[in-house]
Image: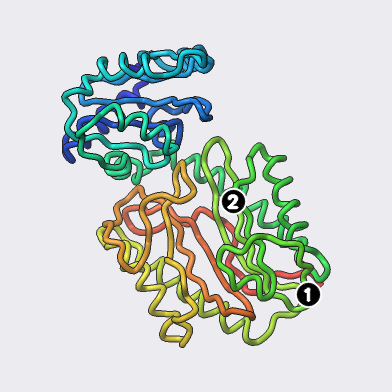
Amino acid sequence: MATDTRTTERFCALRNQMAAIEVDLLVLGPGSHMRWLLDFAPHADERPCLLFISRKSEAFLMPALNAEDVAAQTDIMLYRWHDGDGPSKALTHVLADVDAASAKTVAIDETLRADHALLALDALPGVQRRFAHAALGPLRITKDAEEHSGLMASARINDTAMQTAFDLVQPGTTERQIAAAVHRLYLDHGATPAFDIIGSGANGSYPHHETSNRALAAGDPVVIDIGGIYNGYPSDMTRMAVAGEPSTEYLKLHQIVENAVTAALAAARPGVEARVVDTAARDVIEEAGYGQYFTTRTGHGLGLDLHEMPYLSTTAETILTPGMVFSIEPGIYIPGQMGIRLEEVVYLGDNGPEIFSALPRDAYRANT
């Protein structure tokens, strides 16, 4: 196995978790679970690349064309297969190495391609099946100092990207022009664009609006929800702007959502269930008479993935603990009129949440 201290500690923690939930074998693909465990993941394509982990050993089913690169990063045994031969023979050797025949329960990476998952499962007849997040989710949900630093650095770039977006909010600018400028900012700072939701006017009423060629009109509220990836860590933040003078209705709704954010931040404390934070935000919006227009959950975790545990919803029972990172993003979405969303990503400390962004949640940012 790889001898890096962090990786060794994570393998140990993972095997303890596997024993606790009675998982005998774990199968991972080249995604965020693998990156969390090994600090790298091989190139992912149509060729099966699978890491099998039992309680005592681990081995890779590895496409030969990726093998030399992977071998330079780990001493985990690689069972290589060539395009001309297919993976079947190599898979037999992997399964023998990890003693898969004795496994009663296998956990499969939920992000695997279906054909790769079936390749593994077909080779393990009769096993009980679970998903990998049952083993890895409880470990990944708490961030160490390196993860905290990486997420903070990514958030700082996102602050600058948001300022770039603000500068373009004026009548006549299109949603896509704003998004393009944000993308350039990420690239200029060594980050990769991850997503953009630029929703002007009535488009803001769609929580996951697909940024369009619509030109901003005078007085339009604009939802700006953007994120990039820097050194493997994502950012995510939503702010509001107005193309011109804000309406009285907009200012009223913005204040309600701001109050909901404040209530959720106050409720986010170690030891409470995640749904308590959702309820705190939701109660504010419902008491203001707009409960039917708060159609989303209050937040989601961030780590190597943009969306991961914990999720803050009306039914979320996860107990919040120090070291968790999650968003708080209540909103009001009135069809045909406008949407208001304000989003902070926070690190939960012993005494409450630490907000990553340095930008205020102003109601009125505009160029005229």
Q: Is residue 7 above or below residue 199?
A: above
Q: How is the image coloured?
A: rainbow
The local secondary structure at tag 1 comes to loop
In the image, which disc is placed on residue 217? 1
Q: Residue at x 24, y 25 (%)?
A: 54
What number of labels is visible?
Answer: 2
The x, y position of residue 71, in whole percent, is 45, 13
The x, y position of residue 313, in whole percent, is 36, 65
Image-quadrant location for residue 164: bottom right
The x, y position of residue 35, in whole percent, is 44, 32
Q: Amino acid at mark 1?
A: Ala
The residue identified by callout 2 is: 227
The local secondary structure at tag 2 comes to strand
- Which image quarter holds the C terminus? bottom right
Asked if residue 16 can be seen in this view, the reply is no
Q: Amino acid at mark 2?
A: Gly
Q: Residue at x 52, y 29 (%)?
A: 46
Distance from disc 2 to disc 1, alpha carbons, whole Å, reads 25 Å
Q: Is residue 37 left or right of residue 187?
A: left
Q: Is disc 1 surrounded by few (<14), some (14 to 19) or many (20+) residues within 10 Å?
A: some
Q: Is residue 196 above or below residue 65?
A: below
